[in-house]
Image (cartoon, rainbow, N blue to C red):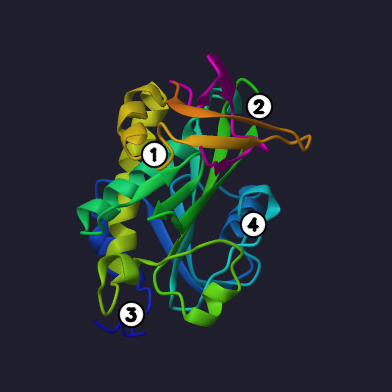
Amino acid sequence: MALSSRIETLQRDAIVAALGRTAKLTVEVVDTIDSTNSELSRRAARQDIHRHVLAAEAQTAGRGRRGRAWTTIAGGSITFSLGWRFEQGAGHLSGLTLAVGLAVARTLEAQGFAGIELKWPNDLVHRRAKLGGILVELTGDALGPSLAIIGIGLNALLPAKARRGIDQPSTDLATVARRRSIDRSLLLGRILGELAAVLEEFAAQGFAPLRADWQRRHALQRKPVEVLLPDGGSARGEVIGVDAEGALVVDNSGQRLRFLSGEVSLVRAER
């Protein structure tokens, strides 16, 4: 079945209607911006951005993890950032990115997008192709409180030309679901509702209650991997899973290695 390029414009009222009243978020939609994360960061210096959502049709300087550029297509992406204040300091929020990914994956599954997996620490994938990514930036005192700016980007419909410009296998929601169009406003509202609920649970109990649910979706669970380290070195082993703080645990010839996200990257290795 051929896929159409028709995707509806993001509409604030439709997003809010899909979100419902219990999440208590404020929602703002703009056409084009450099980066939703960067804009919320600028605003945080002069106003409260807790529970504020900024969504954009397109970003001109979208950012991914480790300073990488994030490709967005006007009308073809779901791109937004959310400000969230925690009483804990950054040291207690190490599993936050994983919790966010779980919220998005749950929503996509509930909306009929089957086979969504999570790749530690911040990717959403489908059949080993990247579907979306998460960038969490934390500021605040070591002991708290702290402010998280949570950026999420999902590919809704990527034209072939855009895919050729991405340096890794990529996919989109239209391909995953074989749909002619994606109601991005409805989907964004549903994601925000689940995300708010997960963040409230995370703030109260940490990552531990979410660990098993996240791990069931891990694309590299019990798979051989290579962990690329910041100093240029690497470590190989089999993924055991993640611990209660969201750290990756790898079995390296009987020795258990533990990695926090930081500047570490994870790639699948051949046996």
Query: CA–CA distance between discs 3 and 2?
Result: 41 Å
Residue linked to disc 3: 8
For marks 3 and 4 on the same chain, the one whose residue lies earlier in the sequence: 3
Residue type for callout 3: Glu
Residue linked to disc 4: 38
Residue drawn 63% across and 72% down? Answer: 60
Residue drawn 65% across and 23% down? Answer: 142
**Residue most extreme to the front:** 271
Residue linked to disc 2: 141
Residue 256 on the magenta segment: yes
- Label 3, secondary structure: give it: loop
Q: Between 187 and 29, which is closer to the camera in this rendering?
A: 187
- Label 1, secondary structure: give it: loop
For marks 3 and 1 on the same chain, the one whose residue lies earlier in the sequence: 3
Residue depth check, mark 2 versus mark 1: number of the one nearer the observer: 1
Q: Is residue 179 visible?
A: yes
Q: How many marks?
A: 4
Which span of residues is magenta-colored? 244-271
Query: CA–CA distance between discs 3 and 1?
Result: 31 Å
